[in-house]
Amino acid sequence: MAKRVIYIHGFNSSQKSYKAVRFGELMANYDVDYCVPNLNHEPLQAIIKLEQLITPNTVLLGSSLGGFFATYLSQRYQIPAVVINPAVAPYTLLQPLLGPNYNPYQDYYYDLNNSHINALKALAVDKLKHPELLYLLQQTGDEVLNFQHAVNYYSQCKQLVEFGGDHSYTGFESTFANIVDFLKIT
């Protein structure tokens, strides 16, 4: 059975995000089942959709809010995950965005409300029980998230912290070999 690689995009993004597409181009060179589900703003619906894709031979790659989801799934199902500039506490970050929102990449409007914030809080992993299953890729120039939060939260995990960059993870392609190695993609 081919390894399933699930890429989990971030908040207000889609399966057409740059990293999802570029990583998919790389995965075309491997015998893998590469999945990038479109996730909407409902955290519990997103998790359910992702859980339905998990097979015994699954690995994860998540960016921003996708990194938060990947962390939850990694620890719950004990599967390897690479997290890229992950949101450690998205329930705090999204609080100022409560109210009407628009996802330009999936072209739909929605209301972000306290039930979404509470759902994210419920998915938070306070203490990593299996830090060896996580690999943090973090850039210090992330203009959306405080990089130090991720460095501290994932302190027991393998880390690649690069000076500079931004939230999109500048030079993402340079990490391909590290990701493939950590996730044991052959």
Image: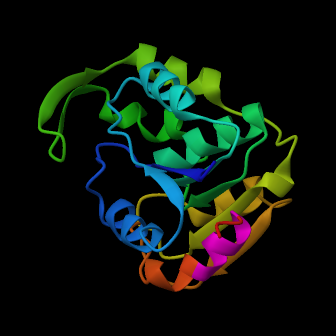
51 is within the stretch colored magenta: no
* Relative height, residue 174 to residue 39 (above, below): below
Q: Which of 130 and 121 is in front in this view?
A: 130
- Percent of width and height locating residue 103: 20, 39
Residue 8 visible in rendering: yes
Residue 56 in percent (x, y) is at 70, 38
Give the vertical position of 26 relative to 113 (above or below).
below
Q: Which residue is drawn at 41% across and 69% down?
A: 28
Q: Give the range drawn in magenta.
A: 177-183
Q: Does residue 29 appear left or right of residue 112 in this picture?
A: right
**Residue depicted at x 43% and y 20%:** 45
* Count of all numbered marks drawn on residues in the image: 0
Residue in the picture at 35% in, 18% down:
113
Residue drawn 36% across the image and 71% down it: 25
Quadrant in which the C terminus appears: bottom right
Q: Is the magenta stretch mostly helix, strand or loop?
A: helix
Residue 123 % position (x, y)? 62, 26
Q: How far across and how far down the image is residue 102, in percent?
A: 16, 36
Would residue 26 appear left or right of 39 to someone viewing this image?
A: right
Q: Is residue 165 visible?
A: no
- Residue furthest front as drawn: 1
